[in-house]
Image: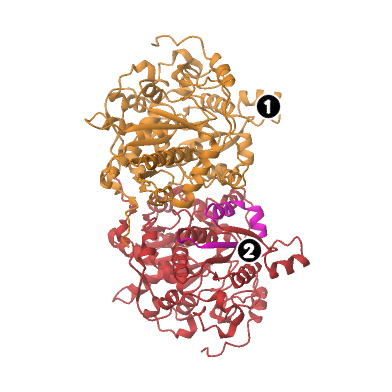
Chain colours: A orange, B red
Amino acid sequence: MKAQRNRFLLDESDTPTHWYNILADVDVQESDVRRLRPLGESEEHRSNGVALNLPLSMYRGSVGRERFVEIPDEVREQYQRWRPTPLVRAHRLEQALDTPAHIYYKYEGANASGSHKLNTAVAQAYFYRKAGVQELSTGSGAGQWGTALSMACQMYGLGLTVFMVRVSHDQKPYRRVLMELHGARVLASPSATTEAGKELLAKQPDSHGSLAIANAEALEYARTVPSGRFAVGSGENHVLLHQTVIGEEALLQMERAGEFPDVVIGAMGAGSNFAGLAFPFHRERLREGVHTRLVAVEPEACPKMTRGRYAWDYNDLSGSTPMTKMYTLGHTFAAPGVHAGGLRYHGAAPLVSALYDRGLLEAVSYGQKAVFEAGALFARTEHVIPAPESAHAIRCAIDEAVKARAERRPAVILLNVSGHGLLDLSAYQQFLAGDLEDHPVSDEQIAASLAALPDQAPLGAS
Amino acid sequence: MKAQRNRFLLDESDTPTHWYNILADVDVQESDVRRLRPLGESEEHRSNGVALNLPLSMYRGSVGRERFVEIPDEVREQYQRWRPTPLVRAHRLEQALDTPAHIYYKYEGANASGSHKLNTAVAQAYFYRKAGVQELSTGSGAGQWGTALSMACQMYGLGLTVFMVRVSHDQKPYRRVLMELHGARVLASPSATTEAGKELLAKQPDSHGSLAIANAEALEYARTVPSGRFAVGSGENHVLLHQTVIGEEALLQMERAGEFPDVVIGAMGAGSNFAGLAFPFHRERLREGVHTRLVAVEPEACPKMTRGRYAWDYNDLSGSTPMTKMYTLGHTFAAPGVHAGGLRYHGAAPLVSALYDRGLLEAVSYGQKAVFEAGALFARTEHVIPAPESAHAIRCAIDEAVKARAERRPAVILLNVSGHGLLDLSAYQQFLAGDLEDHPVSDEQIAASLAALPDQAPLGAS
């Protein structure tokens, strides 16, 4: 019996030296795809301006047209502590599906934060620190982003305050323990630390909190702290830029495997893990004869791409952040409480939205029962427990492989398993017990939140 | 800034082809170090005989004097799904300690079972399957072994029934979810499935259970099932043999790093993760001029080596398993409830005991507060959350590094981080809250359990 090749590992020295800026390779107006502003440009949201302002050094690379942005040595050195991540051929999943398709997955869950979020957390902490920022703040729901940011802040000696939705803070304490182990201060939101929190607590002393409130608190806090900034973990151009290390590595690894993907698949929250893997493959499509499909997978509980609208909208419930042109369900859309908390954001990243608008990407959605079935099959065959978010990509990859079997054609499928699910086992427990439910969204709910879209674009917008 | 080399990765093809049998290199009578028997030799425990009997193919390699035992292709192929595991230079831990010592750790926690246990689980499942066994059973407390065995049984199409201590089953459901995701049947013990369980339930309907009872149930179950066997995850010669892949890889990786360890450190439960790393370095000591120290680290709550006795003793509370010559606190010793559940076994593996008896190993013990301090420092610097068991080895490595600093001498330290602590975050939560306590054991308690040692060796023993 000859052993099959399972993993395509790269050496530390193969860690990418550059991020890939897709703006070089897509025909889109800059004003359509930038959101946060560098210092001095935040006219329309002066009160939040400084707290939201990005360090110029970080901002520049994500809005220009230069194809490759050099990764600072200090960031690359940190990347090399867990990167390159493995590319794995899912032989046993293929066997279980009896498919002629070859399935490869890029696995981002092996670092201590447990997900791809660390790729941008490390870069952001570095740039903020270099710009003289001393403390970051952020809001956190499920906690993947807060965990990654706490590790990154510790690497560079930055303070971090995380406002964590109270119901998660109380009921799921493990993410909080992880953040505290890495030196972050974690406050249950609503908290008595901010005016926004106090105001809400006065009205609802037993409020469970929400991500919208946690973010509002974190933003207020950043305004009140000397050299404080509010950091975000998805959606922004710079975040997507940082995540492209995933796809750059995958390109090299697929080459080592001697294959090229027909389809590249990622779960779609605001878009950073999807874009991180898929964007470098978009660049490859500019070569003659490459027709790789790029598929974003969203939960049917939050179908921003498959059922949303491409429009200018706010990023938060209160409308206190700059507007963004994006696929959105409307900033008042309240997604049902599916376990994939990381996919419940109402909008898609501006860059992902622009590509989708131009027909360069596909999107599909699934209910969570089908998603967990896929996650459990993946666990049983590949022995990796995927995060519920990542299980969306797995569901889609399985369907692609089954289609290839039905059509008796070969197919090379590449997907992003963006994180592990070891802190989501209560969700798998519900799945095993048959207690999971789907949460389809009615046309009426979507129509109502789309009706609440702002009625005009910001000044200077296309 | 020049990036430092962090990880010494090997290619899949570098996965060891042989296990290392230390019996070739240590002067010890075979009767002193064998415990379980192959088919037809279980005279002294006839009733449990078949359920405990090992497949001859697995037994042979672990009792002969042949130095290297070939790993079957089918096992090596499975190993290659997560092996070789990384060897990591702990640069940031070194910096935090301001030590001239170089600290390297072998990391066994990245596979889906979360620990080194998978190395033997896969081998055992393979050999049992090949011998015609159709179902395995085992007892489980904390659940690392049960998790690994459930994955391995799924790989080879074996049934598995895990009797899980009821208090763990009810209070820590996530390990159970992991096992069930991998197809195991998990029963809370005491259960109504066995006579032993029913008897106990009749007396104590609300019993919390114990590992002794869970193992008794698993053993009875194996006797009643056609082609059933009771599988164990530590202590036995064959288990230690399988774990030597850890040390064999580490030897090659240290060579790539251009260094050789002055001291090799592992946490000591029954001994499999310690021996897995340390035994191949014992072989290297047979070369001229190699004086590497091998240090086993146990909890002060269960100091079998530092305060126990080298004697013939039973492996379980009821005395229904064969006797073993080992360092022991006595089979009636009840270790306090420290979080490192995997280190609470009353005895040391016969092979580890024999080497310790001959002065070839050192042993130290620590209280759990000092251990969690070390674990938290490791998390903050290396960004890996260690299992409480593994944090024992980290505590010792830190102390060795601090000693090197005090004595202003270089030192190369190698330790085994045998598993991750992502399912032990409640223990870290207690640590952060200052609620952890040490559990020293009194001389009186140890004297009492040593007094209950069997008063004679088995027939034919030395």
In the picture, residue A205 is in which quadrant? top right
Please give the label number shown on residue B439: 2
Above or below, A74 against B372 in this view is above
Q: What stretch is highlighted in magenta?
A: B156-183
Image mark for residue A201: 1
In 3D space, how far apart are the residues under numbered discs 2 and 1 (Cα atoms)?
Answer: 42 Å
Q: Look at the image and tell me in which quarter the C terminus of chain A lies.
A: top left
**The residue tagged with tag 2: helix, strand or loop?**
loop
Name the foreground residue: A51 vs B106: B106
Residue found at x 26% / y 43% = A255
Q: Nearer the viewer, mark 2 or mark 1?
A: 1
Label 1 lies in what chain? Answer: A
Residue B104's tag is none
Quarter-wise, where is residue B299 in the image?
bottom right
Query: Which x, y percent locates residue A447?
Result: 56, 17
Outermost residue toward the left?
A: A288
Question: Where residue B222 sits: x, y (%)?
Answer: 59, 70
- Which subunit holds the residue at mark 2? B
> Is residue A264 on the magenta stretch?
no
